[in-house]
Image (spheres, helix red, strand yellow):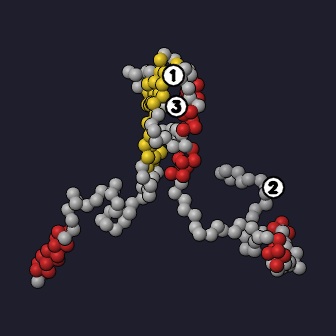
Amino acid sequence: MRPLLASLSLLALLGGCSSLPSLDQLPSVAGEKVLGLVTPYRLEVVQGNVLTKELVARVKPGMPKAQVRDLLGSPLLTDVFHEARWDYVFTIRRQGAAPQQRLVVALFDGERLKSLDVPDDLPTEKEFVASVNTFKPGSKEPKLELSQAERDALPPPKRSTEPTPTAAAEGPAPGRVYPPLDAAPAKAGS
């Protein structure tokens, strides 16, 4: 009887495993849902320097490398084999928003800026903040302070007539005995 019960249990377990989809059919963690039930948390990934139209407009051909670095920040990519090219790559991936990627290339002639290749879709600072801001305000803003009329309508706070005892006046808690602080420490071995 026991071997029959054990074999039926094993058969039921194996049958249950066969009803699950195979691993190549399951969506990966990068997919929308794991096993169709749980949406994984996606970490916000921001790489590179945020460059806007206002920042790029301040950079002019003929500027030295140090000044370009001061205005735009350190480039994300500087190639040892192409010292005259700096790549400013910006990428952001956020949950609930479309990924963004922009590439600005600074080309130098010696120590001076020769040209700056800027994409046409480079946003202004306000456009960038609007595209990144995922906060959706509710229908009503919370009230943060009361008006003078509302403060006057509040009941006055109740004041206690008993004086509050201080910790020093109470002394140690009942049932606790502490050694005096000025007592000489016990000598070792005696």
Hey, which quadrant is residue 148 in on the image? Answer: bottom right
In the displayed structure, 110 sits above or below 14; it is: above
Q: Residue 24: percent from the left, percent from the top?
A: 21, 57
Reading the image, the residue beneath label 1 is 113
Hey, which quadrant is residue 72 in on the image? Answer: top right
Q: Residue 108: percent from the left, percent from the top?
A: 47, 21
Label 1: how many residues lie within 10 Å, few (<14), some (14-19) or many (20+)? many
Q: Nearer the viewer, residue 4 or 99?
A: 99
Q: Residue 133: percent from the left, percent from the top?
A: 54, 54
Residue 98 as seen in the image, left or right of residue 30: right
Which of the two labelled residues, at mark 3 and mark 2, occupies the earlier sequence position? Answer: 3
Which of the two labelled residues, at mark 2 and mark 1, occupies the earlier sequence position? Answer: 1
Q: For the residues marked 2 and 1, what is the alpha-carbon distance in whole angstroms?
A: 76 Å
Pair 3/2: label in front: 3
Pair 2/1: label in front: 1
Q: Disc 2 on helix, strand or loop?
A: loop
In the displayed structure, 131 sits above or below 65; it is: below
Q: Disc 3 on helix, strand or loop?
A: loop
User: Label 2 sits on what residue type?
Assistant: Asp
Query: Quick check: can you spot residue 24?
Result: yes
Q: Disc 1 on helix, strand or loop?
A: strand
Reading the image, the residue beneath label 3 is 74
User: Label 1 sits on what residue type?
Assistant: Leu
Q: For the residues marked 3 and 2, what is the alpha-carbon distance in whole angstroms?
A: 63 Å
User: Label 3 sits on what residue type?
Assistant: Ser
Instruction: Give me the disc on residue 182.
Output: 2
